[in-house]
Image: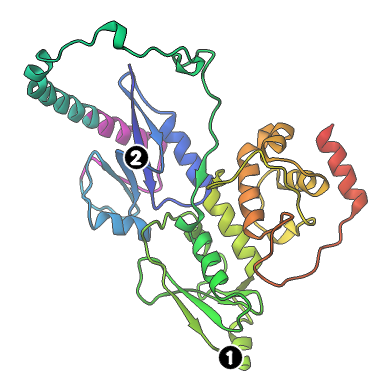
Amino acid sequence: MKRAINIALVGFNGFRYLNNLKYLIEKHGNHKFNFKVVETGAQVRFVNADSPEGRDHLTRHQPSFTTLVASEKPLSDSQYVINKPIKSAAIHQLLDVAGSAFIDSQHAHTRDDANTDKKAKQNVTKMPESFVEKSDKSEDVLPGGKGQAKEELRFYQPHDYLQGRILQALSKNKGSDDCIRFIKPYSQSELLMTISIADGLVYMPEGVNKIDKFYGILMAGTEVKTQIVQMDKNHKSELFSSGCMSLDKLIWDSAVGASLGRLPKSTDSSTTIKMKYWPNLSRLKLRGGFTQIAALWTQNSYSIGQVRDFLPQYSQQINAFYAAASALDLFEGGEHLMVTETAKKVDKGLFNRLFKWIKS
């Protein structure tokens, strides 16, 4: 029987990159073991040594069969370190070595435990069969039987990502004329971005194309420092004249980057919801299927499960779309964090054609 080894990815970011890496890892295995990418309960970690999160992890852990490393620069001659760019042959060899070492270590522990408990087990009295509780529930069948549950939805905690830290800071300073500075995670003073709440703009000293790598970093237990600052009109106008993106785009993009096809924790996938208006998707981070998803939720009230029935090929994109739209409170019954434009005008002719095409 194959042994499943849980592995977590540390410091790897980007929706497509993570999915490709997950595919390479989970599709590889042998008759003894296979790997499963998880967020909690990991037994092995695959660390990106070139990311802030990865560097922090490596200050506490050396490369081993439980700490696999990928690096642009050679770190050591350890068999548990591979060089970037990551190639399928290299990662498969790394997994073979680590998996075999992991299984061997588990067998050693099992033998030690067996020897320690041998005498104790001999003294255990067998419980009479009449006292053994039997279950006739259909759920208690072997995998593959009629009682096997459907695949569960995957969830994430927004506060563990940059998305949640942004929303938390905004909620504490709603309606303020002040600006909020964010310091980079794992840094004491290096500026990540400055948000002008009143103007709905975000200044990024390294440019708007550098922020994406922070969206998928798991920040649970990591402090992200913020500073409330006051700026005069001229200073603010000069600062936000270039290297900026809209605050709405930042919230949307950071939610999509954190979601990775998962739903925010505590989401009820059976509750019917409807969007307030057609979102301006032209300026937002798009995934395949977002336009069709928007068309469904703008026309009628549907649950997440119903939208998945309409568009089964876009199940992960539906979850990511919901995560981003709910972060901006674009569904009816929510209140937007920022005061922005009134409801957008919708091209009803184009919209109705889209909707009929989706349902056909």
Label 2, on which residue?
A: 41
Q: Residue at x 87, y 48 (%)?
A: 351
Judged left or right of residue 189, residue 176 is right
Asked if residue 50 shows in the view, the reply is no
Judged left or right of residue 353, residue 296 is left
Dot 2 alpha-carbon crowd within 10 angstroms: few under 14, some 14 to 19, many 20 or more? few
Instruction: Point out the residue furthest to the right here.
Output: 349
Q: Amino acid at mark 2?
A: Gly
Depicted 311 relative to depicted 53: above or below: above
CA gap between label 2 and label 1 equals 48 Å
Depicted 68 relative to depicted 347: above or below: above
Label 1, on which residue?
A: 235
Quarter occupied by residue 280 = bottom right
Residue 84 magenta-highlighted: yes
Judged left or right of residue 219, residue 153 is right
Q: Residue at x 76, y 49 (%)?
A: 274
Depicted 301 relative to depicted 195: above or below: above
Image quadrant occupied by the C terminus = top right
**Closer to us: 132 or 340:** 132
Image quadrant occupied by the N terminus = top left
Of marks 2 and 1, the one in the foreground = 2
Magenta residues span: 78-100
Residue 60 magenta-highlighted: no
Q: Amino acid at mark 1?
A: His
**Closer to us: 139 or 232:** 139
